[in-house]
Image (cartoon, grey):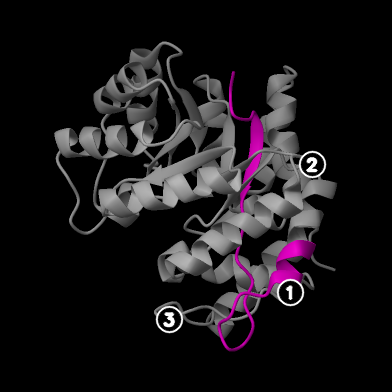
Amino acid sequence: MSIFTGAAVAIVTPMYANGEVNYDKFAEMIEFQLKNGTDAIVVCGTTGEASTLSHEEHLEVVRFCIEKVAHRVPVIAGTGSNSTETAIYLSTEAEKHGADAVLLVTPYYNKATQNGLYQHFKQTADAIKIPVILYNVPSRTGCNILPETAVRLAKDVKNIVAIKEASGNVSQIAKLAHLADGCIDIYSGSDDQIVPILSLGGKGVISVLSNVAPRQTHEICEKFFRGDVQGSCRMQLEALDLIEALFCEVNPIPVKKAMSLMGFESGSLRLPLTEMESAHVEVLKKAMKEYGVLA
């Protein structure tokens, strides 16, 4: 059984001007997502600025999210690290807090061979009982999970059940789907490739777009699953300009600005992330207005 089908939001972490986590706004964002049909919440991922949270902050954000969601949808905790020991620590703590699954990014900077990736993910998954989603995003990590490695992990480790594929390489994802033959669920990690990956048997998307358009992103998936492929494709294409604007600077800079423009006051970013350039803000505003998420 899949952890979720449809659109999971890779939710932002709102902060005060001093950089502390704004839990009041975070609660508002969680309720907005749940009221608008999001299928799962991924907390403390890339979009949630996990890399600049302390371990204590990271786990408190995870705990708070799980408590507020209260089993209404699955909560998936980002617990990856370029240190296997740290990934195990964060994953075991997230499990204690009640996470439904964890999302494990490939080790970054120090990277790894395919054998190193296998050992890293296997040891982390073996330390917990809840399901694991692998996260492949080589543009950020400099490290690519090859299809053969992902399939080997899924077959050898019972709780490695899915992969978030953000390589952008549809040919690689097609090969993964072919080799896997259903042994691992595939989620798009790229908002502009939801429909292409669903067409290869994907189960949904882990989405940045869902922060500002949860209902629409859910419906892209829902239409596809109901057999309205043409309608799903139309919605995918209609969202492309907004998706492009949401990635015109490093994620999550634009999406945090977008949330603030929508009234959620997502607040500041922690360095080295900086405020969005004014010219890009105008591009973002225009795309949001044309898509209908900003008056």
- Taking the spot 34% from the left edge, 28% from the top edge, the residue there is 171
Residue 16: in magenta span: yes
Q: Which residue is mark 3?
A: 271
Residue 70, image x, y percentages: 76, 45
Nearer-N-terminus badge (1/2): 2
Rounded to the nearest angstrom, the CA distance separating label 3 from label 2 is 32 Å
Q: Residue furthest top?
A: 181
Is 25 in front, or is 139?
25
Secondary structure found at label 1: helix
Indicate the amino acid at tag 1: Leu
> Cα distance, mark 1 to mark 3?
21 Å
Please identify, in this view, whether the residue under mark 1 or under mark 3 is nearer the observer.
Answer: 3
Q: Quadrant of the N terminus?
A: top right
Magenta region = 1-28
Rendered position, 187 above or below 99: above
Residue with the mark numbered 2: 37
Residue under label 1: 261
- Position of 91 with respect to 18 (left or right) is left
- Mark 3 is on which residue type? Leu
Q: Position of residue 78 (x, y in %)?
A: 48, 50
**Does the segment drawn in magenta span residue 174?**
no
Secondary structure type for disc 3: loop
Residue in the picture at 74% in, 70% down: 25
The kind of residue on which mark 2 rests is Gly
Mark with earlier residue (3, 2): 2
Q: Earlier in the sequence, mark 1 or mark 3?
A: 1
Q: Is residue 264 left or right of residue 50?
A: right
Which corner quadrant holds the C terminus?
bottom right
Q: Which element is circle 2 on? A: loop
Classify 10 Å Cα crowding around label 1: few (below 14), some (14-19), many (20 and above): some
Residues marked 1 and 2 touching at CB (< 8 Å): no
